[in-house]
Image (cartoon, rainbow, N blue to C red):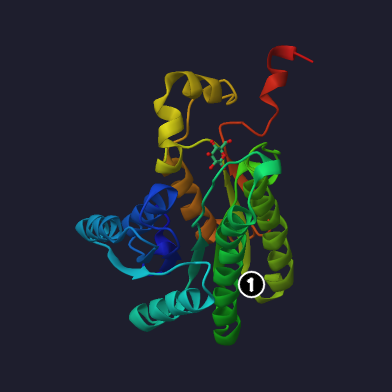
């Protein structure tokens, strides 16, 4: 537990499911005030809120599409109105929708870029604007992926969005470091979340992915949530502009294991 997270106002986009849900629950356990953004899954968002409240925490849910500027503005403003301030903005909402690149429609490309990259930009911008105007040494965490560095055939839009997040966060980190605002990325590898449920339900595909992970197992959402808590806490007070990979070693060229190559 990171005691300084108690009472901090934390907004999490895509907070009703997957990694977002795990982070919401973790910040709830830290006794933070959690703002759970959801797009369509209202019931799941309310479940997360209940879970946080059962653990003695506070939470609200806010519907919003991160690709819409007015929705992101409303999300941040609602957090400030309901809980009095904003301390941590976690831009987590993301989608992936594979297609061979030569057949990828512009709509599909735009949907993934709008959600993963533009959504994260809008959330970062709104949070940083509030931090600057109110002299708050706030914190932005953007959800990247191992695919900010590993190219991924059939996922060119997804990889492009995560590569974009890498330099977006690094640039924002540099720009606002003098004000004490920290901006970092988390780069998950293969995690046990609904986005991957179908793939990992198939034992052959699961074993194939596991063979690409030096630690040998698909990550648990809680293993990302604990890193988010660390980055948001003052224990990470001198950390900005990094991607902290949470990937069981996936980015370390596993095909070279055992001296191959
Ligand atoms: C994707 C997962 C994938 C993992 C490793 C993540 O960014 O969301 O679907 O399993 O990268 O390739």
Nearer to us in this view, 99 or 168: 99
Residue 68 screen position, x and y as percent: 51, 72
Q: Is residue 176 left or right of residue 64?
A: right
Residue 175 appearing in the image: yes
Q: Is residue 121 left or right of residue 149?
A: left
Q: Residue at x 62, y 71 (%)?
A: 181
Residue 39 screen position, x and y as percent: 39, 63
Q: Is residue 50 left or right of residue 119?
A: left
Nearer to us in this view, 88 or 66: 66
Depicted 82 relative to depicted 259: above or below? below
Kindly identify which residue carries mark 1.
180
Residue 128 screen position, x and y as percent: 59, 75
Mark 1 residue CB less than 8 A from any atom of ligand 1? no
* Residue 170 found in image quarter: bottom right
Depicted 28 relative to depicted 244: above or below? below
Residue 242 appearing in the image: no
Mark 1 secondary-structure assignment = loop
| Neighbourhood count class around disc 1 (C-alpha, 10 Å): few under 14, some 14–19, many 20 upward | some
């Amino acid at each position: 537990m990171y005691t300084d997270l108690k009472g901090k106002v934390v907004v999490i986009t895509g907070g009703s499911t997957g990694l977002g849900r795990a982070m919401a629950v973790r910040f709830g356990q830290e006794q933070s005030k959690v703002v759970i953004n959801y797009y369509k899954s209202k019931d799941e968002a309310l479940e997360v809120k209940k879970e946080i409240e059962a653990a003695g925490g506070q939470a609200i849910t806010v519907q919003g599409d991160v690709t819409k500027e007015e929705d992101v503005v409303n999300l941040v403003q609602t957090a400030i109105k309901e809980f009095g301030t904003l301390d941590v903005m976690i831009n987590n909402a993301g989608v992936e929708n594979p297609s061979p690149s030569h057949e990828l429609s512009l709509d599909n490309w735009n949907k993934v870029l709008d959600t993963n990259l533009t959504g994260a930009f809008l959330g970062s911008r709104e949070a940083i604007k509030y931090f600057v105007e109110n002299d708050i040494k706030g914190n932005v965490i953007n959800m990247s992926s191992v695919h900010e560095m590993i190219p991924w055939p059939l996922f060119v839009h997804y990889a492009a969005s995560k590569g974009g997040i890498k330099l977006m966060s690094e640039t924002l980190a540099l720009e606002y470091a003098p004000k004490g605002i920290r901006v970092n990325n988390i780069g998950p590898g293969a995690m046990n979340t609904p986005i991957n449920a179908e793939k990992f339900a198939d034992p052959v595909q699961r074993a194939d992915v596991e063979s690409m992970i030096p630690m040998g197992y698909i990550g648990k959402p809680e293993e990302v949530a604990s890193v988010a808590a660390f980055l948001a806490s003052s224990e990470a007070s001198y950390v900005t502009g990094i991607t902290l990979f949470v990937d069981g070693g996936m980015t370390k060229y596993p095909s070279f294991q055992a001296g191959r190559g």
